Amino acid sequence: MRIGRRTLLQAACVALAGAAPIAVAHAEDTVKIGLIVPMTSGQASTGKQIDNAVKLYMKQHGDTVAGKKIEVILKDDAAVPDNTKRLAQELIVNDKVNVIAGFGITPAALAAAPLATQAKVPEVVMAAGTSIITERSPYIVRTSFTLPQSSTVIGDWAAKNGIKKVVTLTSDYAPGNDALKAFKEHFIAGGGQIVEEVKVPLANPDFAPFLQRAKDAKPDAMFVFVPAGQGGNFMKQFAERGLDKSGIKVIGPGDVMDDDLLNSMGDAAIGVVTAHIYSAAHPSELNKQFVEAYKKDYGQRPGFMAVGGYDGIHLIYEALKKTGGKADGDSLIAAMKGMAWESPRGPISIDPETRDIVQNVYIRKVEKVDGELYNVEFDKVDAVKDPGKTKK
Amino acid sequence: MTMSTPPEIVGFHARRTARWHWAEFAFWTVLIGCGLLFPSRYLIMTEIVRLGLFALSLDLILGYAGIVSLGHAAFFGVGAYSAGLLALHGIVGEPVLALLVAGLAAAVLGFATSFLVIRGVDLTRLMVTLGIALLLEALAERFSDITGGTDGLQGIVMQPLLGLFEFDIFGKVGFWYTVAVLFVLFLLARRVVHSPFGLSLRAIRNNPLRASAVGIPVNARLVAIYTFAAFYAGIAGALFTQTTQLASLDVFSFERSADLILVLVLGGTGYLYGGLIGALVFKLLQETFSILTPQYWLFWIGLVLVVIVMIGRERLHRWVLFLPRSIARAVRSGKTAAGGAE
C-alpha cells in the first residue's frame, strides 16, 4: 500500500489545484459567444477556417456592438459529438455564453440542439449541412448551407446538359445521404438514370475500390459528395486510377471542390462542374475585399466554411444591433429571423419560418485563372430555400 | 502452500493487505468533497469518474492478470450502444436496470472473446484485442440502420433515475449517479482482488507456468477475470450513453483504447486506484492544455507524457510529496508514537 498512499495524496493535491479555476465574473456589458469547432482531427480545416473568418470579421468591425463587448471563447471538439455536447453545456452553464456557434459536423450540431432548447441559447450553425438540423430546436439558425440546396440544383443541371447515366459516390452519413436523395429525385425527374450507388465510410475513406467499380459501370458522370477536407484525396485517387482520362465527368455539390484544397488538386480537377453557394472567385466587390483580407492575414484563400463563419458572426452582430444590445435567446432569435444581407457569397437571408439560410446556388466549373485553379461561376439559381423542408 | 507457510499465515497477510488504509478514506472523501465544492464542474468531473471506472476495468486484467489489451473500447462500445438502444426503443426504461443489462451484454462478449485472448502471449493479445474492437466498429458502421452509423444514435431520452431523479442540464444527477456506480463497483473489485481468487490471478501474472504447477486453473481464471472486466467496461460505456445521451461510432475508436493505456501509465497498475488517479491527471492535463491552446493541445499532452515516462512515476511522486511528507515526518517524530502502517 506504499504507492497507494503517496499517489492518493498527490491526487488530492492535483484535484484541488486543478478544479479550482475558471469562475470569471460575468459582466453585464459583455456578450459571450462560445465557438465550438473541430480544431484537431480530420475535420480541422473546417474549424480553422471558421476561427480565422470570425477573427477577421472582428478585426474589421471591432469587438463592440450596440454598446456590448463581444467575447469569443474558442473550444475544440475534435468533431466528436459527446465533446461538443459537454463543451456546449459547460459554456452555457459556467461561462454563461449568450450564443453557441460553430459545429463542424452534423452529429455535433445535433448533439447541442437539446441544450439550445433547454437553455434558450441561440445555436448558430456555421458549417454542418444536413437539412434536419434546424428542425431540432427553435433556437437553431444556420448560416452555412444545406446539401439539398446544392444537390437539387446540380441534379437539374445534369439532366438538362446531356448527362444520362450517373454513378454516385457519397460519404455514408447524414449529409451524404441528404445530398444523394436530393440529387436522385431531381436527376431522375429530369430523365436521368442512376446506374450505381456507392457509399464510402466517412472515417477512413480509401476511394480506390469504389472508383474501380464506378469506372467499370461506364457512366457519363460521377456524382460525388465528400465532406470538405476529403476532396483533395478523392481527386488524387481519381487521377491515379486514370478516371480523368476516361471521359467520366465529376459533378456534385461543391464540397468536393472546396477552395481550401482546390489549388493543390492539380489539373485533374479542371472541368469539374459543381453547384455550390460560394466560390472564392465570386465576382463581387465585397468578395474581392474579403478574399484579399483573408489571404493577407492567413496566407491562403477562404473556402465556403470560412464564409459560413464570417456570415455567422455577422448575423450575431446585426441581431445585437437590432435588439439594441439585448442578448437573451428569444430576442436574438426573433431579430435573426428574416434578416437579409449581402455576404461575400452574394445576397442571403434567414428564412423566418425555418431559420435556415436562403441563398443563391451557383453552377461553377473549375478553370485555371492566372495560373491557379478556381471554381468559375457560369450560372445560378436565385434565392434557393432548403428543398429538404419546402416539400413538407 | 508448502509446509513453511501454513494457511493461517497466508490468510493473515491477505487480510492485512485487504484492510482499508486511511489514505483510501481520504481519497473518497476528497472525491465527494470535489462534487460538493465545484458544482459548476460536474460535467468534466463526470467524465473523469467515468474514465476512472473504465481504466479500473483495464487495470483488473492488466494489473492483476497481466493481460494487455489495445481493444478495451470494444466492451465500452457494446455497453454504450446497449444502453442507448435500450433507452431509445424503451425496452428497459429505468437507467439502473438498463445499466446492468448493458454491462451483462458486454460481459457476454467478453466471455466469448476471452477464449481468443487467453490463447496467445502479449503481442498476440494486443493484436487480437485490437482486432475485435476494429471489427465491432466496422460492424456498427455497416449496420447503420440499427446504430445510426456515423451520425450516432439520435434522440435518446433518459427516464428519471430510479423514477425519482431527472437527468439535469448541469449534470448534477449524472455526476452523483456515476460516483455511486463507481463506488459500488470499486468495492466489488476490491473484494475480488483481495480474495483468494485475486491472489491466484497475481500468481498467474507473475508466472503462469508455476501457477499451473501449484494447481491454479490458469485458463479458467483468466476467462473469469476477462469477463468480469468486460462487465465493468460495459458499465462505463453505458454510463457514458446515459449521462451524455449520445452514442456514436467513436465509442469503439482505437483512440479510446489507447488513451486508456495512457491513463494506466500515468496512474500505475495493480492497486485499483491507478486508473482513477490516472484518469484524473489525464483529463486535467487535457482540459488545461485545450483551454490554453485549442489548436495545439495534442502537442503539449504528448510532450508531458514523454517527460513523465522519462522521469518515472516514482521519482515524480517523491518530488510532489516532498512537502506533505516532511510535514508528516515532523508530526510523527513529535509524537514518538509507533508510526503508521508502513
Image (cartoon, coloured by chain):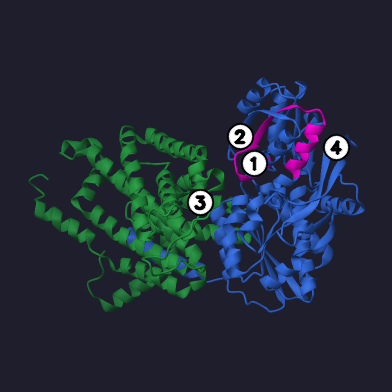
Chain colours: A blue, B green
Same-chain check, marks 4 and 2: yes
Q: Label 1 to label 4, Cα distance in Å?
A: 29 Å
Asked if disc 2 and disc 1 are in contact, CB closer than 8 Å, the reply is yes
- Residue topped by disc 4: A372
Image depth: mark 3 or mark 2 in front: 2
Same-chain check, marks 3 and 2: no
Task: For mark 4, name the chain.
Answer: A
Q: Label 3 to label 4, Cα distance in Å?
A: 43 Å
Q: Across the whole image, how many numbered discs are drawn on residues?
A: 4
The residue carrying pointer 2 sits among few (fewer than 14), some (14 to 19) or many (20 or more) residues within 10 Å by Cα, namely: some
Same-chain check, marks 1 and 4: yes
Image depth: mark 1 or mark 3 in front: 1
Amino acid type of the residue tagged 2 in the rendering = Lys
- Left or right side of A135 for A312: right
- Residue topped by disc 3: B305
Amino acid type of the residue tagged 3 in the rendering = Leu
Q: Secondary structure at mark 1?
A: helix
Residue range of the region highlighted in magenta in the rendering: A150-179
- Residue topped by disc 2: A199
Image depth: mark 1 or mark 4 in front: 1
Q: Nearer the viewer, residue B219 or B167?
A: B167
User: Residue, x 81% and y 54% (percent of image)?
Assistant: A297
Amino acid type of the residue tagged 4 in the rendering = Glu
Q: Secondary structure at mark 2?
A: strand
Q: Which label is found at residue A176?
A: 1
